[in-house]
Amino acid sequence: MIDFEFHSPTTLEEAFDLLEQYGEDARVIAGGTALVLQMKQRFAQPGHVIGLRKIPGLNSIAIEAMGSNGDTGSVRIGALCTQRSIEYSEIIGQKLPLVAETFRRVATPRIRSMATIGGGLVHGDPNQDPPPTLIALGASAVLTSSRGQRVVPVAELFLDYFETDLRPGEILTSVVVPQAPPGSGAAYLKFLPRTADDYATVSVAAVVTAGEDNMCRDVRIVLGSVGVTPVHASDAEDSLRGRPLNEENIRACAAMVSDLVDPLDDYRGSAAYKREMAQVFTRRAIQQAMAAMSPEKNKD
Ligand SMILES: Cc1cc2nc3c(=O)[nH]c(=O)nc-3n(C[C@H](O)[C@H](O)[C@H](O)COP(=O)(O)OP(=O)(O)OC[C@H]3O[C@@H](n4cnc5c(N)ncnc54)[C@H](O)[C@@H]3O)c2cc1C
């Protein structure tokens, strides 16, 4: 392990000052599950590590007021919330069951007890579970610095392999996740043929909203582990939106996904195999999302 100085600010302002003072030689740390490994492997060699845990207010989960336009409202999740606390949160279980289910699929309870939602997003690993679900639900990341706040859709946060839009001096302070629309069903599928605590070979989050006569009013499909960033399959969504949610249309929509992903060959499978699995699991995710719609909810 490299030598570094550890700082424990107790306010965000103090943390911003430290980031400004030490610039590129500083890194913030949340759960440490990713950064400590990078430091051990010398991929990251910060001289100053800034712990966020003593800053109050970064680990709460709260319902945001419903929007004036009659939307279903959102939940604000503090960046320091551990994956385990999200998995077990009563608010998340009630308002965002897809998020609870997705976090339950991450690694092991030991990792989930340390790893945070904010650390996972800033880590920028395209193989992680939460990003597809957060993007499918239309979540936004709140990035705060001494200059103010930026609210960035999670869909736009990932720029490249392990590269995010976090700018110097910024700290991710919360993630705002809208509830799925009324009349919708959602599913997150993680295909992992190896061990249950592995990263996905392919993962898919789908949120489907049905209208009258089983028409697809809206659909969101986002895949993980099949590109350098999470892949939002918007062309495939367009092919299903406004059409009947029948077997033929769902198959045609899923078939389009193979051309939208760009997976790597690795020990979890060849790129060709992952393309095939992306199609299969997209079809299953849409079907599972439809099965999760309650008949009551489907009424207009
Ligand atoms: C053995 C193992 C198995 C894993 N399996 C899975 C899996 O199956 N699925 C999955 O999704 N993930 C998996 N992970 C990844 C895990 O989810 C991430 O390591 C974790 O989410 C990172 O969160 P953290 O709080 O520990 O981040 P840290 O390690 O503390 O930080 C990660 C990065 O984010 C930065 N950072 C942290 N918090 C903030 C903030 N609030 N604002 C700005 N920058 C910040 C740090 O500077 C660092 O660059 C696994 C990890 C391990 C070690």
Image (cartoon, rainbow, N blue to C red):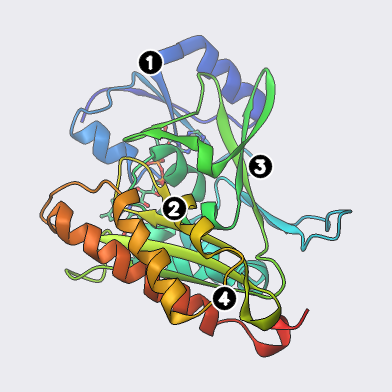
Q: Quadrant location of residue 92?
A: bottom right
Q: Position of residue 61 (x, y in %)?
A: 66, 57
Residue under label 4, please give it. Answer: 244
Q: How far apart in space, not on screen, are marks 2 and 3 (Cα)?
A: 38 Å
Mark 2 and mark 3 lie on one chain; the one further toward the N terminus is 3
Q: Is residue 40 above or below residue 178?
A: above
Q: How far apart in space, not on screen, are marks 3 and 1 (Cα)?
A: 25 Å
Residue under label 3, please give it. Answer: 56
Number of other residues with Cα within 10 Å of mark 2, as a class: few under 14, some 14 to 19, many 20 or more: many
Q: Is mark 2 within 8 Å of ligand 1?
A: no
Q: Does residue 133 appear anywhere in the picture? A: no
Q: Position of residue 228 (x, y in %)?
A: 31, 40
Q: How far apart in space, not on screen, are marks 2 and 1 (Cα)?
A: 37 Å
Q: Is mark 1 within 8 Å of ligand 1?
A: no
- The answer to whether marks 2 and 3 mark residues whose Cβ atoms lie closer than 8 Å is no
Q: Is residue 116 above or below residue 295?
A: above
Residue under label 1, please give it. Answer: 25
Give the residue displayed 59% in from the left and 16% down from the top.
Answer: 17
**Mark drawn on residue 233:** 2
Q: Position of residue 266 (x, y in %)?
A: 12, 50
- Give, as a three-letter code, the residue at label 4: Pro
Give the residue displayed 42% in from the left and 65% down from the top.
Answer: 253
- Give, as a three-letter code, the residue at label 1: Asp
Q: Quadrant location of residue 297?
A: bottom right
Q: Is residue 112 above or below residue 216?
A: above
Q: Is residue 196 above or below residue 246?
A: above
Q: Secondary structure at mark 3?
A: loop
Q: How many marks?
A: 4
Q: Secondary structure at mark 4?
A: loop
Q: Secondary structure at mark 1?
A: helix
